[in-house]
Amino acid sequence: MDTAEANISTQQETPSSKFGPTVPVGRFAPSPSGRMHLGNIYAALLAWLSVKSQNGRMLMRIEDLDPRSARSEYAAQLLRDLEWLGLTWDGEVVYQHNRLEYYEAAFDELQQLGLLYPCFCTRAELHAASAPHASDNTPRYPGTCAHLSPAELAARTQLRSPAYRLRVPQAVYSAHDAVQGQIATHLAQCCGDFLVRRSDGVFAYQLVVCVDDAAMGVTDIVRGRDLLDSVPRQLYLQELLDLPHPRYAHVPLLVAPDGRRLAKRDRDLDMAALRERFKTPQALLGWLAYITGMVDVNEPLLATDLLQGFSWDAMCKRRHDIVIDGSLLFA
Ligand code: GLU
């Protein structure tokens, strides 16, 4: 790292300290793109345990901005499935599709800071031009559109509508994750300028999640380890938009024996199949707690039964992905 680079650390004990002490606030933030599967249930259970074990508030936000995948019937089903599991939330459900004006305002703020530029690269061009990013498979943006001349800009605007990227600094962003430990990313080297708005006008996940978590007063973010790489980008956006930094905990993923992450296409582990097989939330939660090492015996229990023994210290010992194979299904 050269001396001109900043080293930005955002380890904070009290995420909302600039707004005074608050009770912990967590959130569920599901994308309604299909039925929940076992991995989603595991992450939701830990998010709920984390905040409820601290007598905090749990909020619900449906991340339904992407018209290519979000369906209102999936959102309704998600809410019913979480209620069935006893993973309750406080207050009204927040839907991102109702919040476009706030994303627009944040986008304008970044625009005024002079940090956005239009990007005309296609997905194919991006993949051809850059080495894959360390682990989340987002290619590092090589800066193709970062310095277009006014003439080039005018010519490309004729051909396609642009996406918008945020310029990143030559700086390391670091944070402490309750499960994964210390993380640090050099934004320019690892990720490059990243999307805040797609070419179809849809605001990007990184931007909206920061806007929403701050607006909802979220202090504790618990989600799957697949989103760990997003943290430095989100820290940078929080800094630019003058939003508080939450605490983070990225929990292990449940993976198939070949290392593949369980996905919505693993039908035998989606909520429809699981509800059919286990019949009661107690039976399902007891088995899930058992196969993920939270309890020593497979016996029915409620989410509330796990509150007392819950601690991130215990969770830290199990930060690796958890393999779900056929034998576990019948354990
Ligand atoms: N909506 C995202 C998902 O379902 C989660 C986003 C987040 O927790 O920040 O994967």
Image (tube, rainbow, N blue to C red):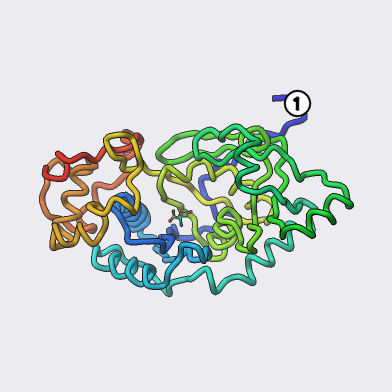
Evaluate whether residue 232 shows in this view: yes
Left or right of 291, for residue 49: right
Vertical side of 43 occupied by 32: above or below: below
Vertical side of 77 occupied by 258: above or below: above
Residue located at (45% from left, 34% from top)? 181
Residue located at (64% from left, 42% from top)? 126
Evaluate whether residue 53 shows in this view: no
Residue 218 at x, y percent in the picture: 49, 59
Label 1 neighbour load within 10 Å: few <14, some 14-19, many 20+:
few
Give the camera-side residue of 298 and 182.
298
Q: Quadrant of residue 9?
A: top right
Residue 322 at x, y percent in the picture: 29, 38
Q: Quadrant of residue 131?
A: top right
- Residue furthest top as drawn: 2
> Identity of the amino acid at label 1?
Thr
Where does the N terminus fall, quadrant-wise?
top right
